[in-house]
Image (spheres, coloured by chain):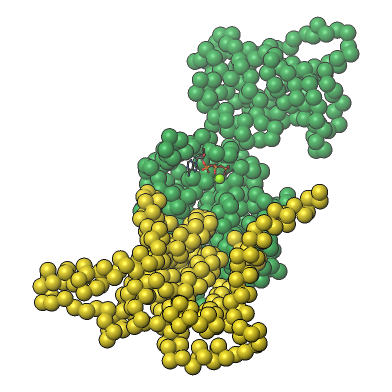
Chain colours: A yellow, B green
Amino acid sequence: MHPRLLPYLLLLPAAFFLCVFFLYPFFLVAWQAFFTDAGEYTTEFFSEMLGHWKFEGALKNTLILTLIVVPIQTALALFMATLVSGMKKGRDIALYIWTIPLGISDLAAGIIWLAIFEQTGFLNSFLYTLGLIDQPQTFLGYQSKTTIFVAIVLAEVWRATAIMLVILVAGMGLIPKEYYECADVFGASRWKQFTRITLPLLKPSLQTALILRVILAFEVFAVVVTLGGTNLPVLMSEIYVWQFDLRDAHVAAAYAMVVLAISILCTLVIMWALRTPKEARI
Amino acid sequence: MAEINIKQVAKRFGKTQALHSIDLNVEDQEFLVLLGASGCGKTTLLRIIAGLETASDGEVWIGGKRIDKLRPKDRGIAMVFQNYAVFPHLTVFENIAFGLRMQKLDQSTIDKRVKRTSELMHIDSLLERYSGQLSGGQRQRVAVARALATEPSVLLMDEPLSNLDALLRMEMRAELKTVLAESKTTTVYVTHDQVEAMSMADRIAVMHEGEIVQSASAIEVYRDPATQFVGSFIGNPPMNFLNAKSSGNGEWNIEGLLLQGPSDRTAIQFAIRPEDLQLCGVKSSTESNTDQLIEPDKLHATVRVIEPLGSHKLASCKVGDALFRVVLDSDSSVSAGDVLALKPLPDRVRWFDPESNKAMA
Ligand SMILES: Nc1ncnc2c1ncn2[C@@H]1O[C@H](COP(=O)(O)OP(=O)(O)OP(=O)(O)O)[C@@H](O)[C@H]1O
Ligand SMILES: [Mg+2]
């Protein structure tokens, strides 16, 4: 057999698998978003989605959550990765501890934070014991959207920063030590070393981490539902509602198309913003 | 004033002792070359001066100030790294300008300095390129230009020309030397190329297994090696060494050659450079009379191999069981198997103590 064909042959099973379990359902969903059950092309499902009173809120909430959570996580992950990379001893232990939340499902994470914030939760009993409040407070009620928001941001940061951390630590490990030594000799402060050397050389890892994280942020669901219930609709929870409560797979599919569109758009923007010319790589 | 004083600096890496108690003074504006075999600790010593490595022991002073607790950036130095460390994400221009930007110089000064140093290193046509688009030698010159551009009072260079072709290296050598003398820079220059060392150095410090065995002018290091190692490391071909037997009253027998030497020893080594021998006679191998007559003021060497090297011929011979090299005139018609009668130039003979390997007065 021609040796050039071998890689393609080896890729075939995986490609087949992807086609059956990813591309096919994807086309089904896309079909459902644009075609009626009778098979006619229509934009009616999109109009229905756009016309629904919860759509704007869901879109806004998702975007705002992403815009708040992702920058916080990026900054935090960069900071933690710098700390970990600078450690001589205990580096692995620190990394293991910081990545524990990665092993917890988002639903479980939501429940953990619910246990903190709910009326009979840890926070209330803590404040009560300290004597700061004389009766349990409702933190997550329908009037206190901001608190719900803060709780979700906290839970998300706690839960999903580590995925960025892991990617960034690996990326920092790829930057040769001598660049820092050189910068040190030529008078660069720690901060200058970070901005002039670490950040530019970390771009490829940062790109990967950001794309991964932003896409996951658009798909935020379980944490929002556990902490906010129906008080804080997001795109994913709306898909769930349309699919299973309102039993309209077409509108749910239209929502899915929106999530897909903004994911692709953001991926492209991130790829462009953090591009590195080929000749300027390590 | 930027003299460097290194006081009893030692460095251990776990079990390996990379440096044993080094004492070295580099005068203000001096060009000192650190010369030594691979792995003898040259880079380690340079990195300790730069502050990239902390000494296990000892002190480092620059310009009368103790600096071994200071960060590298506060030591007033620039450095050319052995592995260049040219930043891959910056163009050649920005690489050279790196130190200048850190000093917050204005753009016109930066432009001027980058232009000057890049022209000096012959890389002025490459300013827009990235490191990945350069050859090894070009990258190395970027590293040198980057260090020169900051106009430091102390410049540390770790084999900065090792990757250039012979011609370019010779040219760069001369230009570097001129520029550094003009800018009154104190320079520590690491190399294991002895020609480079001899041609550039005000002073050569020869390192061997983590120690400085001799630091003196090029000619002194060549003529009067302090140890056997220096004699065999410097000079191509290296110095010849032969065991001498005492025949009493300070007279020594070196495979038949009788010479007056130090009198207070029982064992001693005779040493002479291959070019410091006078050829007094050749006995061809075809001559039947092999029962040569031993003259007591000559060494008798049997030629093994002749290498014609253009300017001269190098004869590798045997004297007794020892290898002995002789530089011959390029016209000489000596061939393998011949026996040479050689007379050492009296003022070029050196004696070494075979126990300590040190030179004897
Ligand atoms: N970080 C380190 N850890 C352990 N040993 C080291 C380290 N750096 C250097 N050494 C050892 O110290 C000794 C001196 O090394 P150094 O790099 O100073 O040699 P060098 O004279 O610069 O050699 P070369 O001419 O090959 O560059 C070597 O035996 C080396 O193996
Ligand atoms: Mg070295």
Extreme residue toward the front, this view: A38
Residue B326 x %, y % = 74, 26
User: Which residue sits at x=77%, y=26%?
Assistant: B315
Left or right placement of residue B295 versus residue A189 in this view = right
- Could you say which quadrant of the image residue A97 lies in? bottom left
Which residue is nearer to you in this view: A85 or B347?
A: A85
Q: Is residue B181 visible?
A: no
Q: Quadrant of the N terminus of chain B?
A: bottom left
Q: Is residue A134 above or below residue B274?
A: below
Q: Is residue A198 above or below residue A36?
A: above
Which residue is nearer to you in this view: B26 or B323?
A: B323
Which residue is nearer to you in this view: B214 or A89?
A: A89
Left or right placement of residue B149 versus residue B132 in this view = left
Residue B5 x %, y % = 42, 48
- Could you say which quadrant of the image residue A45 lies in? bottom right
Q: Is residue A137 above or below residue B64?
A: below
Q: Is residue A135 above or below residue B95?
A: below
User: Which residue sits at x=29%, y=70%?
Assistant: A114
Left or right placement of residue A34 versus residue B311 in this view = left
